[in-house]
Amino acid sequence: MKQRSSTTSSTSSFRGCIFQKAECKFGQLFNRTDDKQFASFDALYTFCLDQQENSQVHSKNAADIIPMSYGGKLGLKIAGDRWYGLNDWSFGQVCRMSGVRKETINHLKVETAAHVLSETFPTSQRPFQVLTHQGQVRSIKAESFSGPSNASLLEVIIDEAYDYAPPLTALGGVSGLYAGEQDMFAFLIDNITLKSIANNTEIDVIWERYQVKLEPVREELNKALNEMWEEWEIPRELDGKWSKEVQQLHADLWKLRIARQKEIDASIAAKAEFEFLYDKPYEDKNKVRVAGPFTVESLSPHRVLAVGVDDELLDPLDKQSESVAGNDGQGFVQMVLDNLRSAGVQQAHKDDKISFSSIVPWPGHFICAEGRYAESTDGKSPEKRAGIFIGPEFGTVSKPDLTAAAREAGDAGFDVLIACAFNYDAHSTEFSKLGRLQVLKARMNADLHMADDLKKTDKANLFVIF
């Protein structure tokens, strides 16, 4: 079983290395390696097949996977097995699962980075699949997520794309076939726009010219086999029971189809417009990304400014603005705290409920209030201090939010962190503890959106631990 340190001193020591990056610059632990380029499709397939046959999948619970250093390198120790090194891709996956920034951990010493990841890596019984190859972790992912191997995808192309001819070189002389350290491969670098293909009238001319030759062969083949196949229904493989005449018709038909496709491809390559697809974009430190296409940004865990009838922004600290907005001085956070104080937090068992004796504001960045409660009602159990973190009114709480709130709660000496939110992302479900600090995630009832119409009572299940 994986052991986690619970001392305050050890926890605070690696926090210092995380956030004082200027004091922990030791170069980078991992860099993305150059992709392997291949001169032919067969060479790429041979590489992927060898990689598949010599790889091993380990199905382990998160508690059986321990980040640790060995021989001056960072890797994972798998319970019941050996230590495996990481590459840049799998290192990034481990950082995301631990809720820490890869850019920060990548500049720490190996021992410090191993200590940080061992303290923050999930300790649940959730199963994971660790894919290893030649002593190195290629990828780590949830057991429920699976997909075909690189070799299997190439076999589909071999079986179905009979006329596929990948480019040996693309624009700039780069090979069109390559495999990276990620669990993926790609071999088409230059992307031809669909608009230029649709506007290429020469394709229709080529099609009609070959159709005159193909139709008689197809009709003869159907007549010989007593079939009614359309062109796309004719099988690629020969049937051993066919006569030599039928086999020759079949070979002639496919020879014409392949020749037609090659001529169409040559026409497209000669007349089409190209787009450059960048596999490795460079990072510009002087620019800050705000949002881009197809990006959905969640709201920050704070209430947004109200808008008046004339679309003007209303300052929540201005009492006159509050009356115009209809707040009456009560913001979203205060409304949640008032209902939390009266309703409490319902846990898994009906009788196991957290009832607060007091809730007072807390001047933190993520922690907004301090709640005190007793674990039992017999008066013998000691009182516990809970740091309360409230998510956005319209948005989702992510695992990095919970991790940051848990660190702040641990620094402040709270016994437990209670997070209240309407929605949590998938990665946050496995986050239940950070060092000694227990993290309770309460889902808020949607009725809180109508807080003005709610009657505050201790019978309402407005906050439920899941």
Image: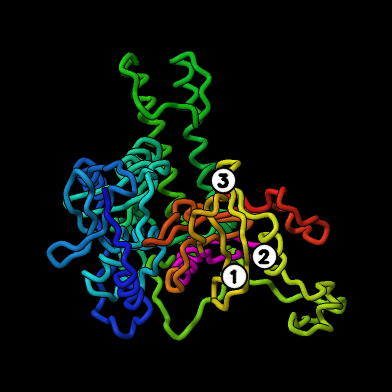
Q: Dot 2 lies on which element?
A: helix
Residue 266 in percent (x, y) is at 42, 54
Residue 281 in percent (x, y) is at 40, 71
- Residue 299: numbered disc: none
Q: Residue under circle 2?
A: 337
Whether residue 169 appears in this view of the structure is: no
Q: For residue 402: magenta?
A: yes
Q: For residue 444: magenta?
A: no
- Residue 352: numbered disc: 3
Instruction: In this rendered view, identify the residue nearer to me: 101 or 303.
Output: 303
Answer with left or right where residue 25 lies relative to residue 171.
Answer: left
Whether residue 291 appears in this view of the structure is: yes
Q: Residue under circle 1?
A: 369
Answer with left or right where residue 357 lies relative to residue 455.
Answer: left
Front: mark 3 or 1: 3
Q: What stretch is highlighted in magenta?
A: 385-409
Q: Dot 1 lies on which element?
A: strand
Answer with left or right where residue 38 lies relative to residue 321.
Answer: left
